[in-house]
Image (cartoon, grey):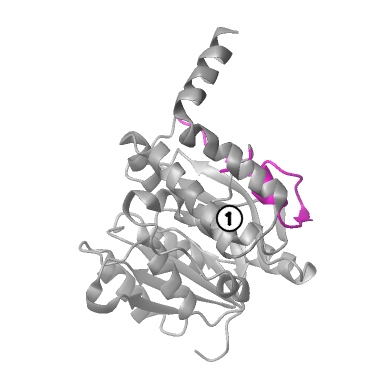
């Protein structure tokens, strides 16, 4: 590569042959050009491996193909971490293999990062993309549930956004993060595997929210493809959502304790979220009482 890129885009993929090319093309048409793309293969057995290698061959100055040793499947978090370890850019931007970026995404976020040097991460609204295969269904833009176009100090987003707050969480494909922040928080939690991958992004974000200011924009920069094979749909439809949520909440409690993070408001919100799981009978009685009122 002739010069150091400002942004390292990372696409992780596993058997994504139906969508991967479209995701990569949405990076190739970015108005901001000083990027590199790392295509991280999590052990694919379909045609997506060859699709990724072909892009790397066609654009060797911009695109690199990565995989785990022996083409192993190690999960989404391990794959994101592999990309981070090999990134050259000052900033990291993730794109899931079934999503796409809008053309101004990197340019807008890079400009915000330069204007707000204290922001460790930048995110915005996401377009939930339904009409990619159903023209009759409207797409929906989901803004984050906080004041927009401003910097939020820690731990404001911990309290305001899902999974502890009421506001929507940012989509992984929308995140734009300083690489030093990724490294400072220890990257993604690699034991969030299989059904736990539904919360692997939330575990990462939970660490970011308590460590660094985050700029939340009103702009829409990505399309989040809605389909039945997504991780969220698979876990929800299998009835595993509550067990995955409880695992995350228990992990976050252990993380805060181990890191000696003393944020009383976060601790209170976390204990409130854990209470129904630790006191299921009382929680059930409370729900019955509320329903009867």
Above or below residue 174? Residue 30 is: below
Instruction: Estimate the x, y position of residue 63 in percent, counting from the top left.
Output: 43, 78
Q: In this image, 69 relative to 265: left or right?
A: left
Image-based side of 270 in relation to 96, left or right: right
Residue 144 falls inside the magenta stretch: yes
Determine whether the residue tagged by mark 1 lies in a helix, strand or loop.
helix
Hey, which quadrant is residue 4 in on the image?
bottom right
Residue displayed at 37% across by 37% down: 236
Residue nearer the viewer, 215 or 134: 215
Q: Point out the residue furthest to the bottom here.
A: 2
Residue drawn at (66%, 48%), measured in percent from left and top? 266
Residue at 49%, 89% (x, y): give it: 1
Q: For the magenta stretch, what is the residue range?
A: 137-165
Whether residue 62 is situated above or below residue 221 in the rendered picture? below
**200 or 122: which is nearer to us?**
200
Would you place residue 191 above or below residue 61 in this image?
Answer: above
Specify whether residue 112 is in view: yes
Q: Which residue is mark 1?
A: 206
Q: Quadrant of residue 151?
A: bottom right
- Tell me where residue 140 appears, x and y as whole percent: 56, 36
Q: Residue at the location (51% across, 63% down)?
A: 94
On the question of residue 140 being in view, the answer is no
Tell me the quadrant of the picture where the C terminus can be found: top right
Q: Percent position (x, y) of residue 196?
A: 38, 51
Q: Nearer the viewer, residue 65 or 18?
A: 65
Please provide percent x and percent y for residue 257.
Answer: 58, 59
The mark tally for this picture is 1
Horizontal side, residue 3 vs residue 129: left or right: right
């Amino acid at each position: 590569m002739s010069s150091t890129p400002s942004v390292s885009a990372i696409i992780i993929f596993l058997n994504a042959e139906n969508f991967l090319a479209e995701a990569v093309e949405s990076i190739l048409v970015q108005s901001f050009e000083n990027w590199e793309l790392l295509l991280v293969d999590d052990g694919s057995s379909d045609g997506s491996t060859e699709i990724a290698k072909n892009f790397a061959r066609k654009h060797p100055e911009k695109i690199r193909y990565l995989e785990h040793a022996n083409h192993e499947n190690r999960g989404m978090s391990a794959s994101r971490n592999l990309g981070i370890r090999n990134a050259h850019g000052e900033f990291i931007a993730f794109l899931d293999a079934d999503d796409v970026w809008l053309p101004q995404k990197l340019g807008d976020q890079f400009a915000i990062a330069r204007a707000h040097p204290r922001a460790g991460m930048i995110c915005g609204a996401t377009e939930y993309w339904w009409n990619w295969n159903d023209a009759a269904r409207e797409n929906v833009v989901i803004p984050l549930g906080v004041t927009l176009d401003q910097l939020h100090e820690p731990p404001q987003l911990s309290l305001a956004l899902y999974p502890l707050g009421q506001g929507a969480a940012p989509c992984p494909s929308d995140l734009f993060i300083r690489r030093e922040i990724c490294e400072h928080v220890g990257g993604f939690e690699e034991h969030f595997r299989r059904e736990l991958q539904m919360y692997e992004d939330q575990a990462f974000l939970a660490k970011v929210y308590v460590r660094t200011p985050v700029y939340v924009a009103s702009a829409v920069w990505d399309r989040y493809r809605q389909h039945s094979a997504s991780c969220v749909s698979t876990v929800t439809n299998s009835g595993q959502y509550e067990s995955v949520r409880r695992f995350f909440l228990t992990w976050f409690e252990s993380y805060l304790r181990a890191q000696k993070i003393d944020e009383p408001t976060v601790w209170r919100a976390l204990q409130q979220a854990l209470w129904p799981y630790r006191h299921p009978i009382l929680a059930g009685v409370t729900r019955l009482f509320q329903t009867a009122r």
